[in-house]
């Protein structure tokens, strides 16, 4: 079967060849069996460690940035502009990549999480971004992707007028999902490491990671279900978003989408009380992973994702004895920004 896996990886690689890629990851991230949790939960639980992608505390955004930065470098850009929440891993990672290539980073922060204390605005990803010497913009709305992108476009036009060459990493789904290409490659990477799992679990927010992961697995002839655990929108809204993102991704790759709409699986049982907010299920999952395996999860994405594993198991969607692969997307600096919440 190794030759078949290599063939599938080659097929995916050929699809990606036309897209400039800034190599930010030197090797595949490892997969790790969680022995104690497997025994405790009576499943065969594995973790794909994309928290170990390197570069400024790693995380899944490194994969996406390979393609955004590839496009920026091809354009000879000198400035990167991006939008995210105050504790966004994406903006922190983008700032680190910009520093690596001698570019300026402009980070537009949105207020998405209500009622947070002082540490949320000064520690974690904010502290790291400050160390990277970025320029900040602030956008008052937390759920207006078109407005946020328009504000970046306005700032970019000012930079152009000043002789600079800006590159915008957009937020809205009306743009080609270039970052999702990183997880098309990531799904094919996993298929070489492991192909015999019964179900995989990923966080589903912007949709880029979820869409690319699903596309990469399907193109590698792995047809086990992929559940996207909702971290920002309810299951129905997220499924609708995923339908658009995956169609756009297929168009970007110039292929037919290799799966049907009903294969877009979303689950929102650990979303409450909302994006970036820590409910009882999220806190329980975060502590369980830490205390059983010594592995840290972040409160915004991965703790909710592991809570999704527990919820799907409780609902009988994941069966006892099944082999389950969860994607650990990193985001660990946010733990420090959430210190007041976690300690309360």
Image (cartoon, helix red, strand yellow):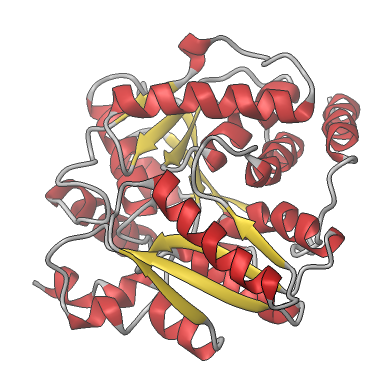
User: Does residue 97 appear in the picture of this structure?
Assistant: no
Residue 301, placed above or below residue 311: below
Front position in the image: 84 or 15: 84
Residue 110, placed above or below residue 9: below
Whole-percent x and y of residue 206?
A: 46, 42
Looking at the rendering, in which quadrant would you find the C terminus? bottom left
What residue is drawn where x is 40% and y is 79%?
126
Whole-percent x and y of residue 236?
A: 30, 22
Looking at this rendering, what residue extends furthest in the left direction?
Answer: 344
What residue is drawn where x is 15% and y is 51%?
279
What residue is drawn where x is 54% and y is 35%?
174
What residue is drawn where x is 47% and y is 83%?
128
Whole-percent x and y of residue 266?
A: 37, 26
Whole-percent x and y of residue 258?
A: 68, 14
User: Does residue 123 appear in the picture of this structure?
Assistant: yes
The image quarter in which residue 331 lies: bottom left
Looking at this rendering, what residue extends furthest in the front direction?
Answer: 161
The image quarter in which residue 235 lies: top left
Left or right of 81? Residue 181 is right
Front position in the image: 332 or 163: 163
Front position in the image: 304 or 131: 131
Left or right of 172? Residue 140 is left
Left or right of 140? Residue 258 is right
């Amino acid at each position: 079967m190794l030759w078949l896996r290599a063939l599938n990886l080659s097929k995916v690689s050929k699809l990606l060849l036309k897209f400039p890629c800034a190599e930010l990851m030197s090797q595949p991230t490892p997969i790790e069996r969680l022995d104690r949790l497997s025994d405790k939960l009576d499943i065969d639980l594995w973790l794909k460690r994309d928290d170990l992608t390197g570069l400024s505390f790693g995380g899944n955004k490194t994969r996406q940035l390979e393609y955004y930065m590839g496009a920026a470098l091809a354009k000879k850009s000198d400035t990167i502009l991006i939008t995210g929440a105050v504790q966004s891993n994406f903006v922190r990672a983008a700032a680190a990549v910009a520093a690596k290539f001698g570019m300026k980073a402009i980070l537009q922060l949105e207020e998405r999480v209500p009622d947070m204390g002082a540490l949320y605005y000064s520690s974690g990803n904010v502290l790291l971004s400050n160390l990277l010497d970025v320029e900040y913009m602030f956008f008052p709305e937390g759920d207006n992707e078109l407005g946020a992108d328009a504000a970046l476009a306005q700032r970019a036009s000012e930079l152009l007028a000043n002789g600079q060459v800006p590159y915008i990493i957009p937020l809205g789904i009306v743009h080609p999902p270039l970052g999702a290409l990183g997880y098309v490659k990531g799904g094919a990477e996993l298929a070489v490491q492991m192909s015999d799992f019964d179900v995989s679990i990923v966080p589903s927010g912007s949709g880029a990671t979820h869409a690319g992961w699903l596309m990469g697995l399907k193109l590698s002839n792995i047809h086990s279900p992929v559940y996207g655990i909702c971290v920002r929108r309810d299951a129905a809204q997220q499924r609708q978003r995923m339908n658009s993102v995956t169609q756009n991704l297929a168009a970007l790759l110039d292929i037919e989408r290799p799966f049907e709409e009903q294969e877009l699986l979303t689950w929102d049982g650990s979303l409450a009380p909302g994006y970036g907010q820590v409910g009882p299920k999220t806190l329980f999952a975060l502590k369980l992973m830490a205390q059983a395996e010594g592995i840290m999860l972040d409160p915004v994405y991965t703790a909710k994702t592991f809570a999704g594993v527990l919820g799907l198991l409780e609902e009988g969607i994941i069966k006892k004895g099944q082999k389950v692969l969860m994607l650990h997307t990193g985001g660990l600096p946010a733990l420090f920004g959430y210190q007041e919440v976690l300690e309360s």
